[in-house]
Amino acid sequence: MSLVLVVNSGSSSLKYQLVDAASGEALASGLVERIGREGGHARHRHEGPENDSLGSNWDAAVDVPDHFAAFDVMLEGFAAHGPSLEQHPPVAVGHRVVQGGARFFEPTVITPLVKINIDELSSLAPLHNPANLEGIEAAQRAFPEVPHVAVFDTAFHQTMPPAAFTYAIDRDVATKHRIRRYGFHGTSHRYVSRAAAEFVGRPVEELDQIVLHLGNGASACAVAGGRSVDTSMGMTPLEGLVMGTRSGDLDPAILLHLQRRAGLDVDGVDELLNRRSGILGLGGHADMRDLVDAAEAGEERAALALEVYAHRLKAYIGAYLAQLGGVDVISFTAGVGENSAPVRAAALTGLERLGIELDAERNATRSGGIRVISTDASPVTVLVVPTDEELEIARQTLEAVSA
C-alpha cells in the first residue's frame, strides 16, 4: 500500500492530493478556498475515467468557517465524487510545513512534541506555520488511525555549511533570535535535482547542479551530490531573486531609510517589500506572462523589470558556478521556469564561455515532460523539469512511516 494523502494547509485555503507514492499517479486533487471568510469555494478532481459512475469533477460554493470544516468538505468531495477512501485508504497523511528551523532536517512523524515545536517556530514563519498546524489538527481528527508526517520546506537546506547559512551580524544576537539562513522550496529543489539526475542517466551523488525554481516566489539552489550547499532564500522567503511581488536582495539600510525618511512603520515596510515590490513594483505586472507581453509591446517599465529579473538570476547562476567549482546540470522549474522561454534565454545568454550553450529552437518548444534546451555540444546540460512537490511529499512521507 503506497497511497498518501498530501495536505498543504494555508491560512485561508486547503490544497490536497491523493498520490500513489510508488507509481507517481495522482488519484484525486482538490482545493478549498476562503476558509473563515464569506464566499467559500471547493474544487475536487477525480483523476479517474471521465465516465466514472460518481463523476470526476466537482465545483461548489461551501461554508468553511475553519480548517475542520474544510476537511469535512474534502471528505464530502471524495465520498460523492471519488475515489472512495474506503476502497483507496491512505496509509499516511503528509503535511507541507514551511518552517522547520534548525530542528527538523528530514520528514518527521508528527507527535504532540513535534506540534509544539512547529508552533514554537511560528515566530519565524507567522503567516505559514500556524496555518500548517491548524491543518494538522484538522487532518488528525479526520484521519485518526493513520500516521501523519511533516515534510518541511527548509529541511533540504539543512545540509548547507555554516559559511553558507551564517549572517555576519553579532553572534549573540543571532543565536538568541535564531537569525540565520534557512532556505525554502526544499521539496521542489530535492525533487527536481533527483529527477534531473535520473533523466541524464547518472547518480545524483555524482552531479553538481543548479536548480532554479521560478514561480511567483523564486529561489535558486546549488546542489552538490544531491545535497543543498547554498540557496538564495534566507531567514525568510524575501531574500534572493526578484519575484512576483517580493523585492529579493537589497541593501538593508533601505529599511532604515524608509522608516526615517518615508515615514513607514514596520508593517508598512513589510507590505512594501513582500507585496508591492518585485516585478509588480518595477514593471506593473506580477504575472511574468503579462510582463513579457508588455515588454515586447514596448513598455519601458516592463522591459527594465525583465532586465532586472534576469540580471539577478544570472548573478546567482554565476555565484553557484563558483561555489560548486563547475556545474553539470542546470534545471528550470515551476510556473515561470517551466513556461517562459524569454526568461530562460535572458538568464543564460552570454554564458557560453562558462560552458552553457542554449539551443534557441529547443528553448522555444513547449512540452509537458522533462526536456533538454541546451545544444548537443554544450558542456553543461540545461533542462526544463516540471516540479511535483506533492509527489515528493508523498514519497518522503512513505519513507518516514516505513523506517
Image (cartoon, rainbow, N blue to C red):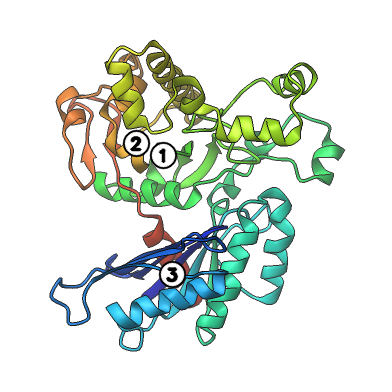
Q: For the residues carrying marks 2 and 1, which lies nearer the camera in this image?
A: 1
The answer to which of 360 and 55 lies nearer the viewer is: 55
Q: Residue at x 33, y 17 (%)?
A: 295
Q: Residue at x 39, y 79 (%)?
A: 76
Q: Position of residue 93 (x, y in %)?
A: 47, 74
- Name the residue that disc number 1 marks: 215
Residue type indicated by callout 2:
Gly
Residue type indicated by callout 3:
Val
Q: Which numbered circle lies on residue 229?
A: none
- Name the residue that disc number 3 marks: 62
Q: What secondary structure is found at the residue carrying circle 1?
A: loop
The quarter of the picture where the N terminus appears is bottom left
Q: Are marks 1 and 3 in contact (CB under 8 Å)?
A: no
Q: Position of residue 301 (x, y in %)?
A: 42, 14
Q: Are marks 2 and 1 in contact (CB under 8 Å)?
A: yes
- Name the residue that disc number 2 marks: 337
Looking at marks 1 and 3 on the same chain, the residue that comes earlier in the sequence is marked by 3
Looking at marks 3 and 2 on the same chain, the residue that comes earlier in the sequence is marked by 3
Q: Residue at x 72, y 21 (%)?
A: 258
- How far apart marks 1 and 3 lie (CA) works out to 29 Å
The answer to which of 157 and 275 lies nearer the viewer is: 275
Residue type indicated by callout 1:
Gly
- Vertically, is 25 above or below 403? above
Left/right of residue 233 with respect to residue 116 in the rendered view? left
Left/right of residue 355 with respect to residue 268 in the rendered view? left
Q: For the residues carrying marks 1 and 3, which lies nearer the camera in this image?
A: 3
Left/right of residue 175 with respect to residue 365 in the rendered view? right
Left/right of residue 235 with respect to residue 381 in the rendered view? right
